[in-house]
């Protein structure tokens, strides 16, 4: 489905009813990443998976895409979609940076937060330089070059062996990202603020999910978030790399279901 927002039309999937649960994909992916969640979790929540601007079926608009602008897109989407109650934001990697921007700026709009394969820290100087190199590569050789450079490190070695078709699905998802999307994300991630100092002020139920074999964002980043968030529960998903929801959907969905049940008990 698509819905018109003030600056662009946004693609999304929606299923189920009850507590709103919004899935936010990472870079340079799309809502297709969450297919197994939309299907399995719609019995427990009103599940929505969005394409961020410049990704999937959402129109490309010129960047940079600050994490705050992407967070505001989510709020505008919910308004336009007539959802007026607090929601759970589940963000993966860059989607986690967006979820943290939502929590920093609009905690009253949130019922909970699921931080998947992400970090609270800002980019290091070295990562910033790598963002510039990636942007130059994308400008010179197109999105395809970015896709091929990232694919080998996205999922766990075992996943590649056991489910080789996942590689093709991922390639397809990533190749559908526009050049504007790739450049907009890179610039936005590079300048995002550090959320570490804010974490102790975050008074929301938080679930942290991380693949044991994540090569892009090491497990210690999830452990650091948990250390700053005493009320958060960290679940490490074995046999998964950077995309635990795709690699180990049953394990991932089970953790989310338990978390949702805990939230519903409290309310
Ligand atoms: C992502 O998966 O969204 C990115 O790898 C995050 C990042 O580059 O910091």
Image (spheres, rainbow, N blue to C red):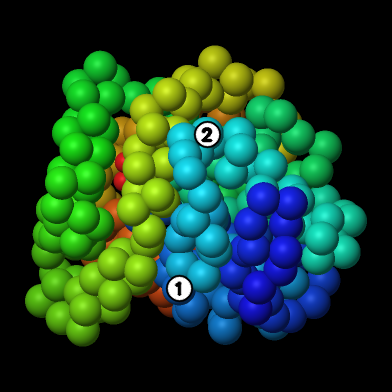
Q: Regarding mark 1 in the picture, which secondary structure is present there? A: helix
Image coords of residue 211 (percent x, y):
32, 54
Question: Label 1, label 2: how many angstroms apart (C-alpha)?
Answer: 22 Å
In the picture provided, is 254 more to the left or to the right than 243?
A: right
Determine the image quadrant of residue 162: bottom left
In the picture provided, is 230 more to the left or to the right than 7?
A: left
The residue depicted at 24 percent of the width and 71 percent of the height is 171
Image coords of residue 232 (percent x, y):
58, 39
Categorize mark 1 by other alpha carbons within 10 Å: few (<14), some (14-19), many (20+): many
Image coords of residue 137 (percent x, y):
16, 43
Task: Tell me: residue 165, above or below residue 151.
Answer: below
Q: Can residue 94 be seen from the camera position used here?
A: yes
Report the quarter where the N terminus lies. Answer: bottom right
Determine the image quadrant of residue 107: top right
Report if the beta carbon of the residue with label 1 is closer than 8 angstroms to ligand 1.
no
Q: Can residue 206 be seen from the camera position used here?
A: no
The residue depicted at 46 percent of the width and 35 percent of the height is 64
User: Of circles 1 and 2, which is in front?
Assistant: 2
Tag of residue 90: none
The residue depicted at 61 percent of the width and 38 percent of the height is 69
Categorize mark 2 by other alpha carbons within 10 Å: few (<14), some (14-19), many (20+): many
Q: Quadrant of ligand 1?
A: top left
The residue depicted at 46 percent of the width and 67 percent of the height is 56
Q: Which residue is mark 1?
A: 32
Tag of residue 66: 2
């Amino acid at each position: 489905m698509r819905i018109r927002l003030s600056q662009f039309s946004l693609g999304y999937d929606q299923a189920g009813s009850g507590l709103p649960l919004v899935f936010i994909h990472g870079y340079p992916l799309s809502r297709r990443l969450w297919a197994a969640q939309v299907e399995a979790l719609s019995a427990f929540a009103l599940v929505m998976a969005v394409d961020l601007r410049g990704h999937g079926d959402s129109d490309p608009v010129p960047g940079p895409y600050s994490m705050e602008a992407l967070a505001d897109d989510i709020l505008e989407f919910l308004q336009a979609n007539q959802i007026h109650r607090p929601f759970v934001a589940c963000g993966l990697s860059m989607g986690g940076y967006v979820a943290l921007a939502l929590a920093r700026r609009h905690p009253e709009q949130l019922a909970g937060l699921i931080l998947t394969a992400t970090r609270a820290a800002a980019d290091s100087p070295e990562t910033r330089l790598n963002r510039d190199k990636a942007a130059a590569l994308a400008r010179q050789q197109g999105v395809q070059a970015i896709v091929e450079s990232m694919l080998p490190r996205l999922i766990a070695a075992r996943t590649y062996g056991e489910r080789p078709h996942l590689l093709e699905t991922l390639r397809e998802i990533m190749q559908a990202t526009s050049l504007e999307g790739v450049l907009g994300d890179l610039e936005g991630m590079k300048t995002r603020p550090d959320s570490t100092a804010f974490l102790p002020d975050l008074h929301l139920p938080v679930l942290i999910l991380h693949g044991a074999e994540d090569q892009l964002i090491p497990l210690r980043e999830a452990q650091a978030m948990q250390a700053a968030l005493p009320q958060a529960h960290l679940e490490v998903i074995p046999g998964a790399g950077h995309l635990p929801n795709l690699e180990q959907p049953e394990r991932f969905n089970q953790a989310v279901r338990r978390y949702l049940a805990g939230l519903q008990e409290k309310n």
